Each structure stands twice: as C-alpha cells, then as structure tokens.
Image (tube, rainbow, N blue to C red):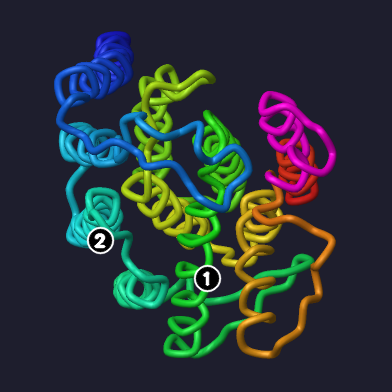
Amino acid sequence: MLSNLMHEKLFYILMVLGTVALCGVLLKIFKNKLPKDQGREFAFNGKLSAGKVRGAGIIFVCAFIVAALLFVPVSLEYIFYYILIFLGMLSGYLDDRAEKPWGEYKKGAIDLVISALTAANFVYFNQDLTGIGFFGMSLDIHPILFGVIATVLVWMLINAVNCCDGIDGFCGSLTTVSLVSVMAAGKILGMDSKMNTLIILMILVLLPYLWKNAEPSTMMMGDAGSRALGLFLCICVLKSGNILLVIPLCFMLCLDGLLGIAKVSLIRFLKINAFKNIRTPLHDHFRKNKGWSNTQVIFRFCMIQAIISAVTVVSMK
C-alpha cells in the first residue's frame, strides 16, 4: 500500500513538472515561428500590442493535448474532445496568421459547427447528465433539446473568452479562476476524475504562457488560445453535471465578453443602443472610463469571480 502511494505521488510530480517543462520548452523553441500582432484598431491602447508574438495558443494547446494523452486514461469521448479543442485552436490560429482578419460571420459559423459537434459528443456519451439543476432540484429534458442548449452555451463561452483577451495576463488568469471553480464544484457533484486531471493540466500549460504574458508581455495567446480555452471551459462545465453552473462560475468572463456581443447585436439588428454609456469589452470600460490600471482590472475581476465562485460552491454543500 505504501509502495502504491509512493508511485502515485511520483506520477503526479512527474505530471506537474513534465507538463510545465514541456510547455515552457515549446514556447521557447517556437516563439520566433509565431506571427506578430498588428495592434487592435478599436481597443483601448490596442496599438501597444503591435509587434508582439501572437498565436501562442497553438503551443500551449498542443502541449495540453500531448500531456492529456500521456497522463490521462484514453477514451473515445475524450479523444473527440481533444480533436475539437485542436480544431477550435487551429481555426483561431489561422485567423491569427491571416494577413486580413477573418470576418465575424465566418468565425461565428466555424465556432457554431465546433460547438454543435461538442454538444453532440457530450450528449452521446453522457445520457445521464442531460438535465438541468437549480436550487436543489433537477429537471430532465430531452437529449436533443439539451444538445441545442449546450451548442448555444459552448458558442457563447468560446466568444466570451475570446473577447476577454485584451489585457496582458487577463484572459489566462480569469479563465484559471473559473477552471478551479468548476473543479471545486465538480468534486461535490462527482465529476469524472479524468476531467479534474485535465483541468489541472490546462492550468499547468497556462503557467509558462502567463509567465511570458505578464505585463509587459512578450507573447499573446491570440484567437488560437482564447477560442480553445472557451471550448475547454464549457466542456468542463458540461461534465460537472450542471450546465447552469456556467452562470456563476464563469460570470466575469461572460459579463466581460458577452456584453460587447449583445451591444453590437442590438445596434446591428435592432438599431438599439442599450449600452451607449458602457465601453465594451467591459475591461476597456474600466480602463478608459474609470481609470483602472491593467493590474487593477485583472485582480479585481479575478477577486469578484473568486467570491462568486466561493459562494456558489459553499451553497452546494
């Protein structure tokens, strides 16, 4: 028994050190192979990012997939998840490399297809988790209807996380808080232990990236990273067994990213400017209109999310 415990500890030590080292080495080797950012025209201080290495998501996502194959038992369901995460990353990376950025509708359509495939994969392998829970009650819904709801959820979270990638260290840090929150909630709900390990692996590959992405950054994840992170985060929420947990456990990501999408959609399709006094993404509102520094935005958003997550998890016990 003692021998098995020692072997288990050595396995986890190897997993942690090996995953961090793998991502760190790959970031160093392939840094000069990545495209350079052109600066964001409409973002607050967007031009400051011009010339920085962009698209690092392709590196840490690939490192994550390699680590997952090495350290997590292989199953068909999870293989499909890895493929979909890779495709989400690849679509973002090709956009990062494109001389002319892809249009919103093209990216939205690709995200929608990936979202639908993710939802279908989840429903097929998790018939027992296609319900909605709230206030201690559970509502069983038809798998097809659940698949539609899950598709919309995945699509929204992909785009929410993508919109949050506008400050050095912000997207990676806030996503990490949400990932830890989902893992904590999943422990209570009996989430698959393989998903817990995958969450740890994703956080581990984010650490070397955040080392280089801390202000003043030399590297950015680009759409390659943010789209894959949004997809992975939503898979984690789905596997927790309660799809509604996306609201409290990813609240700040959704608020920051989706408010801008809602604002643009209302103006474009309904000619309604409901948020005319709010600059979007929301982190730009606090930087430009409220005078917050980048560090203040990151810490305050992460602290608010941590408080909301803590209250949510405690109320589940």
Check the picture and name the quadrant holding the N terminus.
top left
- Inspect the image, locate mark 2, and give the three-letter code of the amino acid beneath it: Leu
Looking at the rendered structure, the secondary structure element under dot 1 is helix
Residue 45: % across, % down: 59, 37
Question: SS at mark 2?
Answer: helix
Residue 189 spot, x, y in % from top left: 58, 53
The mark nearer the N terminus, 2 or 1, is 2
Residue under label 1: 153
Q: In the rendered structure, which amino acid carries the disc numbered 1?
A: Leu
The answer to whether residue 155 is above or below residue 62 is below
Residue 116, located in which quarter of the rendered image? bottom left
Dominant SS of magenta comes to: helix
Disc 2 target residue:
84
Compared with 211, 42 (above or below) is below
Of residues 281 and 45, the one nearer the viewer is 45
Quarter location, residue 51? top left
**Residue 165, visible in the rendered structure:** yes
Q: Nearer the viewer, residue 301 or 73?
A: 301
What's the residue at 17%, 40% (across, down)?
A: 69
Residue 1 visible at all? no
Task: Look at the picture and state if 195 lies above or below 208.
Answer: below
Front residue of 214 and 315:
214
- Indicate which disc residue 73 carries: none
Q: Position of residue 18 (x, y in %)?
A: 23, 17
**Quarter occupied by residue 13:** top left
The residue lying at 52 percent from left, 57 percent from top is 237
Q: Is residue 80 magenta?
A: no
Residue 290 belongs to magenta span: yes
- Number of numbered discs overlaid on the protein picture: 2
Residue name at image x 39 percent, y 77 percent:
105
Query: Is residue 289 or residue 72 the one in the foreground?
Result: 289
The stretch in magenta equals 284-304
